[in-house]
């Protein structure tokens, strides 16, 4: 029986590098804030979904159809996009996000919940689109 570890690692490498860069950016922007670790969970969930998608597809993205790859992409777009956009806005003080706020770091308190909910909605949309493909 042929091992699936090689194809999974090769196909997962770009996703893992992108997630590592996003996690490093989140940790850099937030610094020693208590919410920094919590805000990496939706980003790591993208990596977990990518691993699961490749595992179910036996080392290929579309090995079991389009449901898992499109669901993973549907989760990644809002989870990564919303998180990185708000961190960027905080870093460059977009529209006074930092300077005009009384408690500027509180924007990150519930951000993992918002990004996870948006990611789940995106996952379901991608899953449904994958079923109809």
Image (cartoon, rainbow, N blue to C red):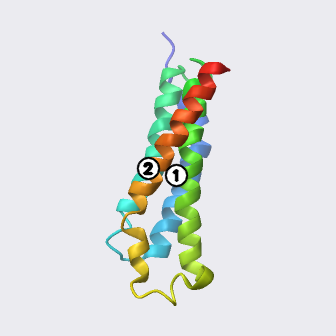
Estimate the x, y position of residue 88 in percent, counting from the top left. Answer: 59, 72
**Is 24 above or below relative to 132?**
below
Placement of the C terminus among the 4 image quadrants: top right
Q: Position of residue 36 (x, y in %)?
A: 39, 67
Q: What residue is disc 2 on?
A: 116
Location of residue 70 by image quarter = top right
Image spot of residue 21 (x, y percent): 56, 59
Residue 122: give its label.
Answer: none
The single residue placed furthest to the right in the displayed view is: 133
Q: Residue farthest to the top?
A: 1
Closer to the camera in the image, 125 or 2: 125
The residue carrying mark 1 is 79
Q: CA distance from mark 2 to mark 1?
A: 6 Å
Camera-side residue of 59 and 78: 78
Dot placed on the residue nearer the N-terminal end, 2 or 1? 1
Q: Residue at x 54, y 68 (%)?
A: 86
How many dots with numbers?
2
Given contact means CB atoms under 8 Å apart, are the residues at marks 2 and 1 in contact?
yes
Q: Is residue 23 above or below residue 12?
A: below
Q: Residue at x 53, y 81 (%)?
A: 97
């Amino acid at each position: 029986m042929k091992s699936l570890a090689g194809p999974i690692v090769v196909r997962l490498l770009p996703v893992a590098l992108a997630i590592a860069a996003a996690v490093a950016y989140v940790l850099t922007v937030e610094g020693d804030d208590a919410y920094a670790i919590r805000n990496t969970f939706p980003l790591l969930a993208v990596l977990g979904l990518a691993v699961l998608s490749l595992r179910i597809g036996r080392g290929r993205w579309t090995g079991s159809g389009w449901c898992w790859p499109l669901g993973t992409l549907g989760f990644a777009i809002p989870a990564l996009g919303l998180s990185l956009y708000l961190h960027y806005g905080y870093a460059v003080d977009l529209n006074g996000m930092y300077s005009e706020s009384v408690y500027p770091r509180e924007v990150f308190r519930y951000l993992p919940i918002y990004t996870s909910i948006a990611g789940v909605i995106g996952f379901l949309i991608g899953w449904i689109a994958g079923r109809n493909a």
